[in-house]
């Protein structure tokens, strides 16, 4: 045999060998790439689900906190019926909890302070509320507001001396506020405010605009009406003073889902500029928000819910002692080759596009529910 021929064959690969090698390499690359692609898709899906769940949990905590604090008027145990309202009109509602059920039109605001469109647009519009979702509002004295009274009030003086804190600096004429010492609680409208040295002087004279104060009397024999206009009644007890008495600003906080799927909280109330609210999103890709209210209908209230009803079936908002919160969210992107056929049937929500509480699409969903008791009704 020719030695030259043997040497030339031992120095390379045949065409068949090259084709086999290339094919094997291509198969390995395809398998690796496919595995990598699947892993990336799984990772992306898990990341979406985690993001959705975390956002919803944070939003749920915010709502639950406001439910617990609803009706906080400065001290645990205060209720809307126990404090003295000196305002000039009974039309302002300070129910701790109120709401709408499965909104389908731009109806009246659950509170009488302002029309609905001062907070959110018409239902179904670009800036409005998502149809067939609930709206809930919670009114309370802002527990984070800190403005203690530093000088004993001399009745019938209309002045209150506060410590000049950063919160006190935010007060303005027209604000509706409360003052409480855990024995007495009074609601009023600020008619003037000034600052000197380390003190803020808040004035609550009779009148003062809309709604204005019917009286400057903070305390009298009849704590539950605003008819205390007799000077002798005004002088019948000491005014508010240290230690323990503080001023709080009243806020209403509304939770609602926009047509863009964002869960929003609108915070505000009466101020020198009228009724003003600021809205901000707290969660994305929300499909439904539902509330169920526990009413204490006992002849002798015991603080425990006897019935659970939707907002349109509440007989008296002052009887609401607990709230169920239901939240449904979805992932931001559709998952390939996945169909979500689960039925999400809770509260009294709409039965969805197919009439059976299903969506039949490629979104993963997360349902979160919690029952919260109003803290002001708890016995300490």
Image (cartoon, grey):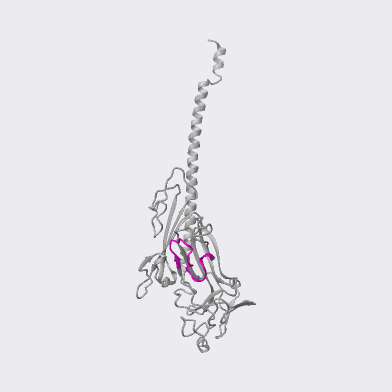
What is the quadrant of residue 159 in the picture?
A: bottom right
Q: Give the camera-side residue of 159 and 33.
A: 159
Give the answer, above or below, for where 207 lies relative to 313: below
Q: Position of residue 227 (x, y in %)?
A: 49, 83
What is the residue that sits farthest to the top in this orientation?
A: 1
Q: How many marks?
A: 0
Query: What residue is shown at x 46% (from left), y 75% (from top)?
Result: 80
Q: Position of residue 12 (x, y in %)?
A: 55, 20
What is the quadrant of residue 308 in the picture?
A: bottom left
Question: Is residue 264 visible from the viewing direction of this image?
Answer: yes
Give the answer, above or below, for where 232 lies relative to 124: below
What is the residue that sits farthest to the right in this orientation?
A: 197
- In magenta, the rendered stretch is 98-117
Find out whether residue 206 is within the magenta segment.
no
Give the answer, above or below, for where 356 lies relative to 336: below
Query: What residue is shown at x 47% (from left), y 69% (from top)?
Result: 70
Find out whether residue 101 is within the magenta segment.
yes
Predominant SS along the magenta part: loop
Q: Give the camera-side residue of 83 and 180.
A: 83
Q: Give the camera-side residue of 86 and 249.
A: 86
Question: Is residue 200 visible from the viewing direction of this image?
Answer: no
- Quadrant where the image shows the C terminus: bottom left
Q: Position of residue 248 (x, y in %)?
A: 53, 73
Q: Position of residue 292 (x, y in %)?
A: 40, 64
Query: What residue is shown at x 47% (from left), y 41% (from top)?
Result: 38
Left or right position of 161 against 305: right
Q: Give the camera-side residue of 221 and 160.
A: 221
């Amino acid at each position: 045999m020719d030695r030259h021929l043997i040497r030339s064959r031992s120095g390379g690969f045949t065409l068949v060998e090259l084709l086999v090698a290339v094919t094997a390499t291509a198969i390995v690359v395809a398998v690796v790439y496919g595995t990598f692609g699947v892993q990336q898709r799984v990772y992306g899906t898990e990341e979406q689900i985690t993001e959705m769940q975390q956002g919803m949990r944070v939003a749920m905590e915010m709502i639950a906190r406001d439910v617990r604090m609803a009706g906080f008027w400065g001290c645990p145990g205060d209720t809307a019926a126990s404090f003295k309202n000196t305002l000039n009109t009974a039309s302002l509602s300070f129910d701790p909890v109120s709401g709408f059920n499965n909104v389908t039109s731009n109806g009246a605001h659950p509170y009488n302070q302002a029309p609905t469109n001062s907070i959110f647009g018409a239902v179904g519009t670009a800036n409005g509320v998502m149809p067939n979702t609930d709206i809930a509002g919670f009114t309370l004295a802002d527990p984070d507001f800190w403005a203690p009274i530093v000088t004993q009030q001399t009745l019938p003086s209309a002045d209150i001396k506060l410590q000049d804190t950063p919160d006190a600096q935010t007060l303005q004429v027209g604000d509706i506020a409360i003052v409480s010492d855990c024995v007495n609680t009074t609601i009023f409208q600020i008619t003037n405010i000034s600052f000197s040295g380390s003190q803020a002087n808040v004035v609550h004279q009779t009148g003062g605009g809309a709604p204005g104060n019917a009286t400057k009397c903070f305390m009298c024999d009849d704590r539950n009406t605003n008819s205390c206009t007799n000077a002798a009644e005004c002088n019948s007890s000491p005014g508010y003073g240290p230690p323990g008495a503080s001023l709080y600003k009243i806020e209403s906080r509304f939770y609602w889902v926009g047509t863009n799927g964002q869960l929003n909280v609108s915070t505000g109330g009466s101020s020198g500029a009228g009724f003003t609210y600021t809205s901000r999103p707290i969660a994305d890709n929300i499909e439904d928000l539902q509330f169920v209210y526990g009413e204490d209908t006992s002849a002798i209230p015991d603080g425990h819910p006897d019935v659970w009803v939707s907002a349109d079936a509440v007989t008296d908002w002052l009887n609401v002692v607990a709230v169920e919160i239901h939240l449904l969210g979805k992932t931001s992107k559709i998952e390939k080759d996945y169909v979500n056929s689960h039925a999400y049937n809770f509260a009294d929500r709409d039965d969805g596009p197919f009439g059976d509480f299903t969506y039949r699409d490629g979104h993963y969903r997360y349902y979160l529910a919690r029952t919260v008791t109003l803290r002001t009704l708890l016995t300490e």
